[in-house]
Image: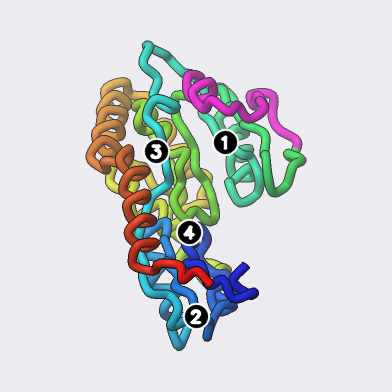
Amino acid sequence: INSRGYNRPIIATCHYDGNYNMIRTNGKNDWAELLLFINSIMEVQYRKNIVPWPSQIQQTETIRPLMHRNKIEILEPFHGDCITLVNANLNKGVVQFLEMARKLPDRRFLGVLPYYGERQVPLAPSNVEWVPFDDDIRTILKRTRILLVPSYYESFGRIAVEAMLNRIPVIYSKPNPNSVYPGGSTEGLHEWIQPAGIGCIRDNIDEWVTAIRSLDNESAYSERAEHSRHHIEEMNLFVEASRISGLVEQFAQRNPVVVR
């Protein structure tokens, strides 16, 4: 539409750090753009890699994913007994997940089949159960005792919020200082999850096994579970929809469309 001269303001959400050429595409145009970054680390990388900064980008903000408490919070008592991975593709850590299952043959592992990326899962040991993705994440979380997030890259990590709100401890990949991606690895997740989450080096499977076993102690588990819940509550995530709505409306008002 804008290539035909309509010059509507554009608002884009940046969920992935690294595709800088897409931001350069609209340079030297007459419309206004607002970039919304899904974490506070991303903008620094964008500005470092996009020089000069496009003049049409008039505003930037950091936002967080839209989440609705009534769609993710479990209100009734539940007692999950599984160590769970959601969306079991390579980036999310399916290889590491299966290595943990092999090292802990006496534990129950629950893998949610991948819904993007590599759709075929590797051969798994007998203590791994595969289930399809459920639109109601609470179906999966009710079966979960520990959530694993052994991702290579995460700009935010929504599933960790969903687990921690329900007092499910989360073990995740620490950022890789030598990431193959220009935008890093799990810095976006690490930024908000500390100190409630348990960080491990992604390919050090023994470290993950130790972290899992550390939660066998019921008092340690309960303490981590309550810490996780409290951490999410302090983030005040569930007002984000109205905040983003306000940002959109204000940007549109500051950049009114000229009708021709």
**Residue 133 pos. (x, y %):** 63, 30
Closer to us: mark 4 or mark 1? 4
Three-letter code, disc 4: Thr
Write down the residue under mark 4. 13
Q: Residue at x 36, y 70 (%)?
A: 59
Is the residue 199 above or below the residue 188 in the image?
Answer: above
- Tell me the chief SS of the magenta region: loop
Indicate the secondary structure of the residue bearing disc 4: strand
Inspect the image, locate mark 2, and give the three-letter code of the amino acid beneath it.
Answer: Asp
- What colour-coding does the image apply? rainbow
Q: Position of residue 73 (x, y in %)?
A: 39, 24
Q: Quadrant of residue 219?
A: top left
Label 4 vs label 3: CA separation? Answer: 19 Å
Evaluate whether residue 214 shows in this view. no
Nearest to viewer (mark 3 / mark 1): 3
Q: Earlier in the sequence, mark 4 or mark 3?
A: 4
Between disc 4 and disc 1, whose residue precedes? Answer: 4
Residue at image point 33% right, 24% down: 217
The nearer-to-camera label among 4 and 3 is 4
Residue 29 lies left or right of residue 194; in this view the side is right
Number of the front mark, 4 or 2:
2
Q: Specify whether 19 is left or right of 228.
A: right
Residue bearing mark 2:
30
Residue range in magenta is: 123-143
Q: Is residue 131 magenta?
A: yes
Tag shown at residue 86: 1
* Residue named by callout 3: 161
Disc 4 from disc 2: Cα separation: 20 Å
Q: Residues within 10 Å of mark 2 (few under 14, many from 20)?
A: some
Q: Earlier in the sequence, mark 4 or mark 2?
A: 4
Q: Is residue 93 magenta?
A: no
